[in-house]
Image (cartoon, helix red, strand yellow):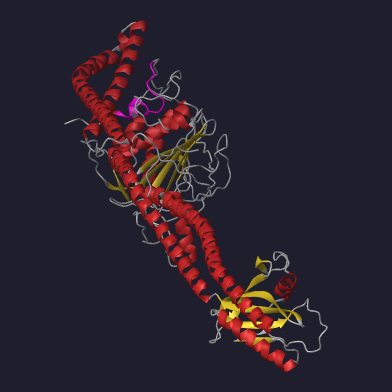
């Protein structure tokens, strides 16, 4: 696992489409798929859109239900209001026809046909609104006469308009619910039909039937056809009005909901905007307050919280400034007495052979602690320069591989004293890159010292590589490792993961904090991967040129042998790891967090231990590095190792331990400290 800094990110949309709230949508509105995806995106990200959509959907469902009920009710009322006068008119017409048939005594066919015509004409005259009249023999007629009346139709109608169900209902006077015909009285029945008018248009109509009795011939049926076109037009108008009213109502609900949501959301957006400004360091920003409602109460509470936070931050900032000034002043004030003490201690140390054994040992301990105190004082002065912003770097063309080689050569005695072997793998990094060699040397030395301290006497691998935009160096140990909580604090000043652990290399406990500041000055990255029991891998990445952006690191942060107990002797492959846009946009990294990046690339170390002290096996090509490093093998690697010399100087140790992750031994630190001006 690797330590990662949470960062604000920005996602580049696929188009410049923006909705009414100013929310950038990821797809264009030109295709159905884009519309659907944008709607889903807005549903997830916009509370006003979601509220308006729900309001419109619920309002539409309600309006449709109410409109359906109202439309059916209005249609039924219109039909009944039209039907009642038509039935009355039909009954009057049937009465008129019955009167004509009752007044005639004719028995011959010609006279009966004349009487039939007169009766039908009288009925049609009485039914002024009828579309036509149909006269036919009833199904219940006697059938005893040979001179029965033939079927007769007046107007643009035919007997086909009368269904069998209606004929049965009129003939029998039966209930109409079973036959499909409706009844207004035992003698009158009706049924809705479709008519074709003079223009050929199909219009709604109705057929109303009843019976008449012809003397000597029995019962006959009369059907009156009426057009319901006017009633249908009225119903259509009412339904159109209802539809328009429903659409207007839904739109009004959407608009009203939008205004209400805007009034409610706007203060929340202001609060969110103010909180972002506060997070950016604008502590004077406040949320506008207006009214006495819940939103105003929220704004006042937010402002009170902001006031409290501002007071606390300002107090902490003032305290930090006082602390920094105190450290700086004390560090400067201690230089003069420390110089005097060092001179006196040096004189005593030079003459320690003249003292007895106990006094000589005391002088040696005094000399060691004075050196350690000098290291701590120099680091405190360096930190105070960073805090004051008074640090400048001197960039020159250098080779990171050469710097790593020099540091490994200087740290070899220390590594041997701890039973550790140092391995340098440098397939790249020999090309020119611009950095402050003294500061980067100090960074590499601090990383190596930390690895030696916690590597548990296992080999330590230093890898150097480069691409077109960056050079990188990683220090991999196979020691105790760190937890996620420890990784997030590894660059804190004077922080120790295990306070009970005794430091064996001295140091001030400020080495990694200073290293991080050195890397920040170069606009680079210092990252760490670590897991308990699997070791630690620090990765330093620098831009090759001043002002250049790091588009990708040549070395992976998470090693491929993350689960190995130590290095393996086999051919390995190293692939570069690319930074995302988020990583590039957020350079340089901020204290005290780390940016963790993972890589699935395998990484194992090829090493060969020579028998002599400080042997160098075939070096890599000094040509300019390529963008992606090639697989590394024995012929390309640079391996530096050491065998034990006749005598190895021992480093001073002390019972006082001041930090887990720090710089290395004092003897290699004096020459690199700056004098404050």
| Residue shown at 57% from the left, 69% from the top | 83
Q: Quadrant of the C terminus?
A: top left
Q: Residue furthest left?
A: 677
Q: Residue furthest right?
A: 144
Q: Is residue 249 left or right of residue 282?
A: right
Which image quadrant is residue 378 in?
top left
**Residue 589 on the magenta span:** no
Q: Position of residue 95 (x, y in %)?
A: 63, 76
Residue toward you, 340 or 13 = 13
Q: Is residue 29 visible?
A: yes
Q: Is residue 200 left or right of residue 382?
A: right
Q: Position of residue 217 (x, y in %)?
A: 77, 83
**Residue 660 on the magenta span:** yes
Main SS of residues in magenta: loop
The stretch in magenta equals: 656-669
| Residue shown at 32% from the left, 46% from the top | 263
Determine whether 297 is above or below 243 in the image: above
Determine whether 157 is above or below 66 in the image: below
Which image quadrant is residue 301 in?
top left
């Amino acid at each position: 696992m690797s330590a990662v800094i949470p960062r604000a990110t920005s996602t580049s949309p696929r188009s410049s489409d923006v909705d009414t709230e100013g929310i950038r949508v990821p797809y264009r509105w030109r295709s159905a798929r884009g519309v659907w995806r944008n709607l889903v995106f807005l549903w997830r990200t916009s509370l006003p859109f979601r509220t308006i959509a729900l309001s419109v959907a619920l309002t539409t469902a309600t309006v449709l239900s109410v409109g359906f009920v109202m439309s059916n009710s209005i249609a039924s009322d219109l039909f009944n209001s039209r039907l009642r006068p038509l039935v009355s008119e039909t009954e009057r017409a049937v009465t008129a026809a019955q009167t004509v048939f009752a007044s005639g005594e004719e028995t011959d066919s010609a006279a009966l046909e004349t009487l039939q015509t007169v009766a039908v004409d009288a009925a049609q005259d009485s039914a002024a609104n009828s579309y036509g009249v149909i006269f036919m023999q009833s199904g219940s007629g006697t059938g005893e006469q040979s001179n029965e009346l033939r079927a007769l139709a007046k107007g643009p109608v035919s007997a086909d308009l009368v269904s069998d169900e209606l004929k049965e209902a009129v003939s029998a006077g039966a209930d109409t619910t079973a036959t499909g015909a409706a009844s207004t009285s035992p003698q009158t029945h009706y049924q809705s039909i479709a008519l074709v008018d003079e223009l050929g248009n199909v219009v709604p109509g109705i057929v109303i039937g009843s019976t008449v009795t012809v003397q000597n011939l029995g019962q006959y049926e009369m059907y009156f056809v009426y057009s319901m076109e006017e009633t249908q037009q009225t119903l259509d108008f009412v339904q159109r009005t209802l539809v328009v009213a429903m659409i207007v109502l839904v739109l009004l609900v959407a608009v009203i909901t939008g205004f209400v949501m805007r009034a409610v959301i706007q203060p929340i957006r202001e609060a969110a905007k103010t909180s972002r400004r506060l997070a950016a360091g604008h502590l004077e920003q406040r949320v506008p307050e207006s009214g006495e409602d819940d939103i105003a109460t929220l704004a006042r509470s937010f402002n009170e919280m902001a006031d409290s936070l501002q007071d606390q931050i300002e107090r902490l900032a003032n305290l930090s400034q006082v602390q920094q000034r105190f450290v700086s002043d004390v560090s400067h004030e201690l230089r003069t007495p420390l110089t005097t003490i060092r001179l006196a201690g040096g004189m005593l140390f030079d003459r320690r052979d003249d003292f007895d054994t106990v006094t000589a040992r005391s002088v040696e301990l005094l000399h060691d602690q004075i050196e350690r105190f000098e290291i701590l004082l120099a680091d405190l002065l360096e930190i105070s320069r960073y805090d004051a912003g008074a640090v400048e770097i001197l960039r020159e063309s250098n080779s990171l591989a050469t710097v790593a080689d020099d540091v490994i050569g200087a740290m070899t005695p220390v590594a041997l004293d701890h039973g550790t072997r140092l391995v340098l793998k440098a397939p790249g990094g020999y090309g020119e890159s611009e950095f402050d060699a003294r500061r980067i040397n100090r960074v590499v030395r601090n990383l190596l010292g930390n690895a030696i301290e916690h590597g548990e006497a296992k080999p330590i691998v230093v890898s150097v590589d480069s691409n077109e935009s960056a050079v990188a160096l990683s220090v991999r140990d196979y020691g105790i490792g760190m937890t996620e909580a420890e990784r997030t604090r590894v660059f804190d000043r004077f922080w120790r993961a295990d306070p009970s652990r005794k430091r064996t290399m001295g140091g001030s406990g400020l080495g990694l904090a200073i290293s991080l500041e050195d890397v920040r000055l170069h606009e680079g990255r210092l990252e760490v991967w670590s897991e308990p029991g699997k070791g630690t891998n620090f990765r330093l990445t620098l831009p090759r040129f001043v002002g250049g952006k790091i588009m990708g690191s040549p070395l992976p942060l998470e090693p491929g042998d993350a689960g190995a107990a130590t290095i393996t002797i086999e051919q390995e492959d190293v692939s570069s790891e690319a930074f995302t846009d988020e990583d590039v946009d957020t350079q340089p990294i901020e204290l005290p967090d780390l940016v963790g990046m993972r890589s699935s690339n395998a990484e194992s170390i090829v090493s060969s231990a020579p028998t002599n002290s400080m042997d160098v096996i075939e070096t890599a090509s000094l040509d300019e590095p390529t963008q992606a490093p090639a697989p590394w093998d024995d012929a390309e690697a640079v391996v530096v190792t050491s065998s034990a010399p006749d005598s190895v100087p021992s480093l001073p140790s002390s019972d006082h331990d001041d930090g887990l992750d720090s710089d290395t031994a004092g003897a290699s630190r004096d020459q690199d400290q700056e004098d404050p001006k």
